[in-house]
Image (tube, rainbow, N blue to C red):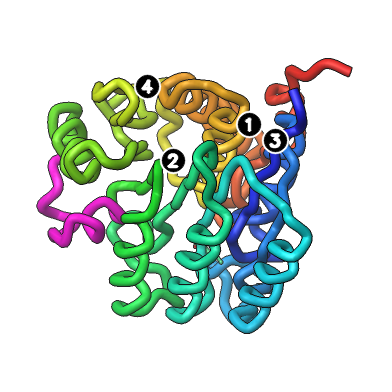
C-alpha cells in the first residue's frame, strides 16, 4: 500500500503537546505521511500558561496551498484543528475545495473549547466560522463543549449519559450527511471514550474504555490524530475510534503514573510503539 498522505492544518505550539506536535509524530508512527500547514506558531498552548507568544500564519496559508497545488500534490485526508484567525476559516474551506477528490477523507476537529469554556484566542465569530467549516467535513470530532457550540445550545443543557450522547451525535450528523465522533462521552461513570455515528452504516455505536479519573490537556488532539491515521489506513469509523480511545487511555494512565502536570499534555512519546504495526 502506498504511504497515505495527510494535510494537517493546525497550530504548532512549541511546548505542551497539542496540535502539530502531536499530529506529526502520531501519524508518522502509524506509517502515514503528515504534511503540516501551520495556522500559528505559539510558545505553548493557551491552556494553563501565562504570557504565551502567538505568531499568526494566516497570510502563509493560501501561498502554501497554491504551491502544493502547482506541484500536483494529493492528500488521502485533510485534517484541520486549531485555527489562528477568523480569515483562516474561509482559507481552510478553499483548501478543502481545491484538494478534495472522491477518495479524500475530510476530518474537521472543530476546536473551540473544553470543560464548558471557550479557548482564550477563539472569538464568537471564529466559533460561528468553525460551525460553518464543520459542515464541509466527512468526519467531525467534537468534545461535549464543542458539541454544544455546534448545536447552539448551552453546555449545561447537554445530557451527558449514554442515551443523551446518542441523541447528540445523531443531531450533529446533519441528517446523516457527516460522521460524528463525540469525544469524552461516558456511558457509565467508570468508562469514557467516544460515541460514533457512521454515515456509511447509519449506525450509532459507543466505544468505551476504562476512565482515568483526571483532566488532561491535548487528549482531543491525540485522539483525532490516531483516528485520522486509522481512517486513511482503511479502518472503519468504529475501529478507528477504538484504536484512538485505547491509545489515549494508555497515555493518560502513563501520565498519572509519572505524576506529570496537566498542562504538559499526555506523555505519549514512549507509547508511540503501540501505533506501529507496519512492515518493512
Ligand atoms: O488542544 C487544543 C489546542 C490546540 N492548540 C492550542 C491550544 C489548544 C487548547 O487549549 O491552546 C494553541
Indicate the position of residue 196 as horizontal and vertical percent values. 32, 30
- Mark 4 to mark 3 CA distance (whole Å): 28 Å
- Write the residue at 47% across / 46% down: 107
Q: Do labels 3 and 1 touch, CB within 8 Å?
A: no
Reading the chain from its start, which is encountered first: label 4 or label 3? 3
Reading the chain from its start, which is encountered first: label 3 or label 2? 3
Answer yes or no: is residue 85 visible: yes
- Mark 4 to mark 2 CA distance (whole Å): 16 Å
Q: Which residue was labeled with disc 2?
A: 214
Indicate if the residue with disc 1 has its beta carbon within 8 Å of ligand 1. no
Secondary structure at badge 3 equals loop
Q: Answer with the quarter of the image where residue 222 lies.
A: top right
Q: Which residue was labeled with disc 1?
A: 254
Query: Where does the magenta region start and end?
Result: 145-160
Q: Quadrant of the C terminus?
A: top right
Q: Which residue was labeled with disc 3?
A: 4
Secondary structure at badge 2 equals loop
- Tell me, for residue 208, which label it has, or none: 4
Q: Nearer the viewer, mark 4 or mark 2?
A: 4
Amino acid at each position: 500500500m502506498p504511504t497515505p498522505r495527510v494535510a494537517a492544518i493546525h497550530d504548532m505550539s512549541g511546548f505542551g503537546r497539542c496540535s502539530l506536535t502531536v499530529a506529526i509524530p502520531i501519524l508518522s508512527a502509524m506509517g502515514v505521511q503528515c504534511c503540516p500547514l501551520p495556522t500559528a506558531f505559539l510558545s505553548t498552548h493557551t491552556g494553563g500558561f501565562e504570557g504565551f507568544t502567538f505568531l499568526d500564519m494566516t497570510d502563509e496559508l493560501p501561498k502554501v496551498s497554491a504551491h502544493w497545488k502547482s506541484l500536483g500534490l494529493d492528500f488521502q485526508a485533510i485534517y484541520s484543528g486549531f485555527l489562528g484567525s477568523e480569515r483562516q476559516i474561509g482559507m481552510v474551506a478553499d483548501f478543502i475545495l481545491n484538494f478534495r477528490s472522491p477518495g479524500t477523507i475530510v476530518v474537521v476537529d472543530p476546536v473551540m473549547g473544553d470543560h464548558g469554556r471557550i479557548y482564550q484566542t477563539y472569538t464568537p465569530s471564529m466559533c460561528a466560522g468553525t460551525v460553518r467549516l464543520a459542515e464541509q467535513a466527512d468526519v467531525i470530532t467534537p468534545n461535549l463543549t464543542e458539541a454544544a457550540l455546534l448545536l447552539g445550545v448551552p453546555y449545561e443543557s447537554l445530557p451527558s449519559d449514554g442515551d443523551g450522547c446518542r441523541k447528540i451525535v445523531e443531531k450533529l450528523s446533519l441528517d446523516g450527511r457527516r460522521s460524528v465522533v463525540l469525544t469524552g462521552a461516558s456511558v457509565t461513570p467508570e468508562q469514557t471514550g467516544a460515541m460514533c455515528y457512521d454515515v456509511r452504516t447509519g449506525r450509532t455505536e459507543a466505544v468505551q474504555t476504562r476512565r482515568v479519573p483526571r483532566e488532561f490537556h491535548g487528549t482531543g488532539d491525540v485522539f483525532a490524530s490516531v483516528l485520522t491515521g486509522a481512517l486513511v489506513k482503511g479502518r472503519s469509523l468504529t475501529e478507528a475510534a477504538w484504536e484512538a480511545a485505547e491509545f489515549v487511555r494508555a497515555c493518560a494512565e502513563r501520565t498519572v503514573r509519572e505524576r506529570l502536570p496537566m498542562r504538559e499534555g499526555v506523555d505519549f512519546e514512549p507509547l508511540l510503539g503501540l501505533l506501529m504495526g507496519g512492515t518493512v
